[in-house]
């Protein structure tokens, strides 16, 4: 019995060293749940526009058994609606985004920030009542490379700010050029890698 416990402990350490163990998901780590972005879709073959949203959130207590090797943020979208469209909105819309997340704070030691990007986020919208349901999100994982700075921001220094910015394009029939796209963000999940 002692031998199997020792083996189990060694296996956990080996897997942690290889980055194969993840924390349970941290829900809504950047306070983005329910925040909205309005995007004016300009005339083009893909009806493109720029997006930006800000949120504030408090420090968190993270119980870290060993030093993490990475932090991934899995983007989430609750729903999408369109207004001001020149024609009847389509039944389905394909959406492609390029997104950058910047997390920052401003402790007495000076401002600091951590950034991660995803260049090919894609999902499908299906009309449901006056809005659209979101399905098949792919490419929505943002990996932070400046991990220690991110952990410092998340755990100390007071109130924090998160900003999502980027571009969005839609493909549909009819196209959505001239529409205003309102994105309601989900909180997403943060996952620490060990």
Image: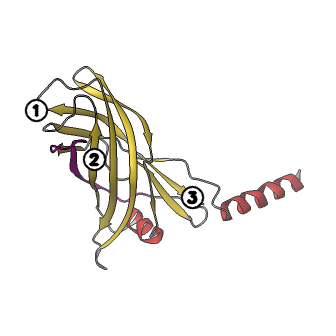
Q: Earlier in the sequence, mark 2 or mark 1?
A: 1
Q: Residue at x 82, y 54 (%)?
A: 5
Packing grade of label 2 (10 A; few <14, some 14-19, many >=20) is many
Asked if marks 2 and 1 touch (Cβ < 8 Å), the reply is no
Quadrant hosting residue 18: bottom right
- In primary-sequence order, the first of circles 1 and 3 is 1
Front label number (1 vs 3): 1
How many discs mark residues in the rendered view?
3
Q: Which span is picked out in magenta?
A: 41-60
Comparing 88 with 63, the one in front is 88
Task: Indicate the quadrant containing the C terminus: top left, top right, bottom left or bottom right.
Answer: bottom right
Query: Mark 2 and mark 3: span between their CA atoms?
Result: 29 Å
The correct choice, above or below, for 45 with respect to 22 in the image is above
The local crowd at label 3, few if under 14, some if 14 to 19, many if 20 or more residues have their Cα within 10 Å, is some
Residue 34, which numbered label? none
Q: What residue is drawn where x is 37% and y is 65%?
A: 115
Query: Which residue position holds label 1?
Result: 84
Q: Which residue is located at x 72 percent, y 57 percent?
A: 12
User: Mark 1: few, some, or many residues within 10 Å (few <14, many ≥20)?
Assistant: few
Q: As displayed, is residue 35 above or below residue 100?
A: above
Q: Which residue is mark 3?
A: 193
């Amino acid at each position: 019995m002692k031998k199997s416990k020792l083996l189990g402990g060694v296996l956990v350490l080996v897997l942690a060293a290889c980055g194969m163990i993840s924390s349970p998901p941290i829900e809504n780590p950047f306070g983005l749940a329910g925040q909205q972005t309005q995007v004016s879709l300009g005339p083009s073959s893909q009806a493109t526009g720029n997006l930006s949203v800000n949120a504030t959130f408090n420090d968190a207590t993270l119980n870290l058994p060993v030093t993490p090797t990475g932090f991934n943020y899995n983007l989430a979208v609750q729903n999408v609606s369109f207004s001001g469209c020149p024609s009847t909105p389509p039944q389905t819309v394909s959406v492609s985004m390029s997104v950058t997340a910047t997390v920052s704070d401003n402790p007495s030691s000076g401002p600091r920030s951590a950034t991660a990007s995803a260049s090919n986020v894609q999902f499908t919208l299906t009309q449901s009542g006056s809005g659209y349901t979101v399905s098949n999100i792919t490419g929505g994982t943002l990996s932070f490379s400046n991990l220690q700075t991110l952990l410092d921001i998340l755990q100390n220094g007071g109130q924090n700010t998160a900003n999502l910015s980027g571009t969005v394009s839609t493909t549909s029939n009819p196209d959505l050029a001239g529409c205003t796209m309102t994105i309601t963000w989900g909180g997403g999940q943060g996952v620490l890698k060990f």
